[in-house]
Amino acid sequence: SSDLNKEEPPVSLYKILSPIESDLGFRWLETPEVFLKRADLFEDQNDCSVPIEFATSTRAKRRARLQGISSREGQGLSNNRLKGLFRQRESEIPKDRPGQIAFDKRRATKFARKFAVLSLTEILDNELMWERYAKSHSGFCIGFDGRALSEYLSRLPSLQIFPAPVIYENEIKPFDISYGGSDDTYDLIMRIKDKATWGFEHEWRMIYYGFNIKNIPPTDAVKFIKSGAIISIPKTLIAGVFIGKKPAPGLKERLNKLIDEKSYPFSLVQTAY
């Protein structure tokens, strides 16, 4: 994990879920488990767009421009015509940032695919979170022992999972990772979000770097699927279950039944949000 992550995780962390996600939440309680989702599959494109740029050398610029030309667009064209397309790509580079390649969403998505993330919040009584993520207060929330969960995930053998708070910035400047980057740079890329849009979330992330379904680490605790990593956790890491002030029909009954069947040492809490 990165040297940047020196902040101790909160005592409690929460995952707020909508009724549509209830099956996911119930699996988390039944197994129990958590799910780290591939970063390029985050539903909100603003949340998963990785702010990166690529290098300034002639070779790197030519390669970047080539990647901006589809095989269909370039098929059958003469070298002179291809050079013309290269010059067109060159002209599209922002004038106030000479020599830098403009943000390439396709390359950024490929980079984001290396990460899997569990997004949590340290604030339970957040009306806006319940409004947005629990579908107008009709869903529920799973509470975790934040420090114990962080320690458990970070100590899993053969995995690189680290807990880190999201860093909210007023202005996000792209990273240049054309020639690789340090672990600190990679950590930061998956932690920075726009303050004006996302600051209300008070988010902590469990970030797995090096996700590759073809290279499964040798551990019984982890199951890889195309969309991310399912990680079994001890039941003791789940600290509570909370339900919104306008629960969906039947949700309270299902949760009470599951909590009883699994002998959790807590009762369902009805919230005012």
Image (cartoon, rainbow, N blue to C red):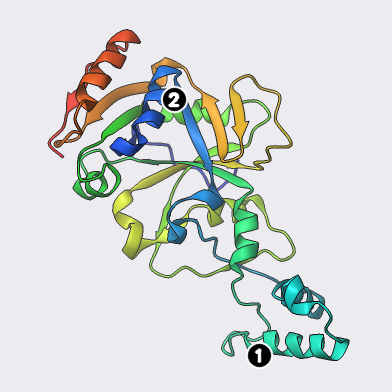
Position of 21 relative to 237 (above/below): below
User: Residue 52 location, x and y as percent?
Assistant: 59, 66
Q: Is residue 266 above or below residue 23?
A: above
Which residue is found at the position 47% from the left and 57% from the top? 192
Marks 2 and 1 close (CB-CB < 8 Å): no
Is the N terminus in the top left, top right, bottom left or bottom right quadrant? top right
> Which residue occupies the foreground of this view, 8 or 264?
264
Task: Locate the C terminus and report the quarter of the image it occupies.
Answer: top left
What's the residue type where badge 1 is placed?
Ser
Q: Could you say which quadrant of the image residue 216 lies in?
A: top right
Name the residue carrying label 1: 91
Mark positioned earlier in the residue sequence (2 or 1)? 1
Residue at the location (47% across, 29% down)? 34
Bin the neighbour count of mark 1 within 10 Å (Cα to Cα): few under 14, some 14-19, many 20 and up: few
Viewer-side residue, 134 vs 232: 134
User: Would you name the residue on which mark 2 appears?
Assistant: 148
Question: What is the C-alpha distance between the residues marked 2 and 1?
Answer: 52 Å
In terms of secondary structure, where does tag 1 sit? helix
Q: Residue at x 24, y 29 (%)?
A: 242
Residue 207 at x, y percent in the picture? 54, 42
Q: Which mark is residue 101?
A: none
Q: Secondary structure at mark 2?
A: helix
